[in-house]
């Protein structure tokens, strides 16, 4: 791709997107260790850990409703208001204790921590569809996947560095997060204010009269039903994604417990594994960015689901073959290294599929609506899956949960190929 051939508007939006992605990479590098902070430093319970993970996903259930409501306000104002409402609460972590208190005293801080991050995660169902619409309407089709992969690659490089530094800080002082999270809140406000500079209201407004609130919500649900009913390839894509999502959510918090309690990893080692898959993702993102624009999106989805399946497979085996070698503060489990190599492939492909995969099933003007439907489905499965995963772990152990996750992923892959044979045409 030759930058000289790009329009002035594409260059401007890509520049803002890149800066936004860089700052968000810092935030993501901190948040990726969130659950470990909660269970290792704050000594939260397993069910509370599932609630923390659930909070990061369940907010998407409101995506379709939010898509209708944001039509009533200027998108610049929405992004700025979202920044203030969702990121300022992080400053309250400054008032957390600097050491572990007795259990009865820590309970308050456990739920306070959860509440703060509920506010933080509320930004996602608001911001993601707006970003999808901004990019879909400012980037040409041929540049869409490539630009998104470059921005995501930049974000992951920054995320990797941040994760390493934050993990090192936590091993030196398990309560250093008290200062890191408030700084993250300030950066988060800056990133969304910068992103608002890419908004041109004429791109995002529909030109249709704004309905009363209740009528608008009813229309939103009817539109969601119509999209699912009329676009069969997209419906199949969402069914497969729903089953994949159950597998991912069932196992996510269980994996955190597995790394901490079964493998006894410190923050530095955890940061290494998190960074190792990000290195692979960074190297492969340009390739996958080009590929997603050329390959059948359901085939791309099937491959993505396979990479997570292999991650769970090797991680589960490590319980029975726990062989490792130590290098300084790092502990390298052979099979866990293999598991996170597959996780790198998963991170590279899923970062594209999850964020822009739905856009390949619709026209430019419908990109935000389709992404809102997609994100709402994410929220629906989050109601059950994370807590159910912890309950299963407590009943059938790590192996049972990992086996179930693998079987669900295998089913989601079969659905993608079945869908391709049944309905071949998609809007690209």
Image: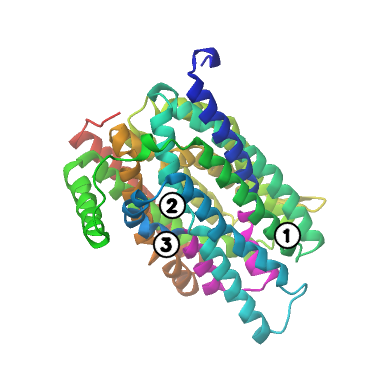
The residue under label 2 is 126
Residue 335 percent coordinates (x, y): 60, 48
Looking at this view, is 399 or 22 the one in front? Answer: 22
The residue under label 3 is 58
Residue 25 in view (yes/no): yes
**Which secondary structure is most common in the magenta stretch?**
helix
SS for callout 1: loop
Q: Magenta segment, which residues? A: 30-56
Residue 357 percent coordinates (x, y): 38, 38
The residue under label 1 is 266
Residue 323 in view (yes/no): no
> Which dot marks residue 99?
none
* 140 to 334, vertically: above or below: above
Instruction: Give the class, few, some or many, for how many residues have Cα within 10 Å of label 3's Cα (few <14, many ≥20).
Output: many
Instruction: Give the class, few, some or many, for how many residues have Cα within 10 Å of label 2's Cα (few <14, many ≥20).
Output: many
Mark sitting earlier along the chain (1/3): 3
């Amino acid at each position: 791709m030759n930058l000289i051939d790009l329009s002035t508007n594409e260059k401007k939006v890509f520049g803002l997107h890149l800066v936004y992605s860089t700052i968000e990479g810092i935030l993501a590098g901190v948040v990726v260790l969130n659950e470990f902070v909660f269970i290792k430093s704050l000594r939260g319970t397993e069910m509370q850990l599932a609630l923390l993970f659930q909070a990061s996903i369940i907010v998407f259930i409101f995506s379709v409703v939010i898509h209708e409501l944001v039509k009533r306000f200027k998108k610049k104002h929405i992004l700025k208001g979202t920044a203030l409402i969702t990121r300022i609460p992080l400053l309250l972590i400054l008032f957390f204790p600097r050491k572990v208190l007795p259990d009865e005293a820590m309970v308050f801080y456990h739920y306070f921590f959860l509440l703060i991050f509920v506010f933080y995660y509320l930004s996602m169902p608001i911001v993601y569809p707006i970003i999808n619409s901004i990019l879909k309407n400012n980037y040409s089709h041929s540049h869409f996947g490539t630009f998104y992969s470059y921005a995501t690659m930049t974000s992951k490089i920054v995320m990797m560095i941040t994760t390493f530094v934050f993990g090192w800080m936590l091993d030196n002082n398990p309560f250093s997060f008290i200062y890191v999270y408030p700084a993250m809140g300030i950066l988060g406000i800056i990133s969304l204010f910068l992103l608002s500079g890419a908004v041109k209201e004429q791109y995002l407004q529909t030109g249709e009269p704004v309905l009363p609130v209740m009528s608008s919500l009813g229309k939103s649900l009817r539109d969601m039903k119509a999209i699912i009913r009329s676009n069969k390839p997209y419906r199949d894509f969402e069914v497969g994604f729903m089953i994949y999502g159950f597998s991912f959510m069932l196992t996510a918090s269980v994996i955190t417990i597995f790394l901490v309690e079964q493998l006894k990893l410190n923050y530095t080692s955890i940061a290494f594994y998190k960074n190792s898959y990000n290195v692979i993702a960074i190297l492969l993102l340009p390739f996958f960015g080009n590929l997603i624009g050329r390959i059948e999106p359901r085939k791309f989805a099937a491959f993505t689901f396979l990479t997570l399946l292999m991650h769970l497979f090797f991680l589960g085996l490590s319980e029975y073959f726990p062989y490792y070698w130590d290098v300084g503060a790092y502990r390298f489990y052979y099979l866990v290294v293999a598991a996170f190599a597959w996780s790198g492939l998963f991170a590279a492909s899923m970062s594209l599929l999850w964020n822009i995969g739905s856009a390949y099933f619709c026209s430019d003007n419908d990109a935000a609506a389709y992404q809102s439907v997609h994100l709402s489905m994410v929220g629906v499965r989050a109601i059950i899956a994370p807590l159910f995963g912890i309950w299963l772990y407590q009943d059938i152990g790590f192996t049972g949960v990992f086996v179930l996750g693998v079987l669900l992923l295998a089913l989601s892959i079969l659905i993608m190929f079945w869908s391709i044979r049944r309905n071949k045409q998609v809007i690209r």
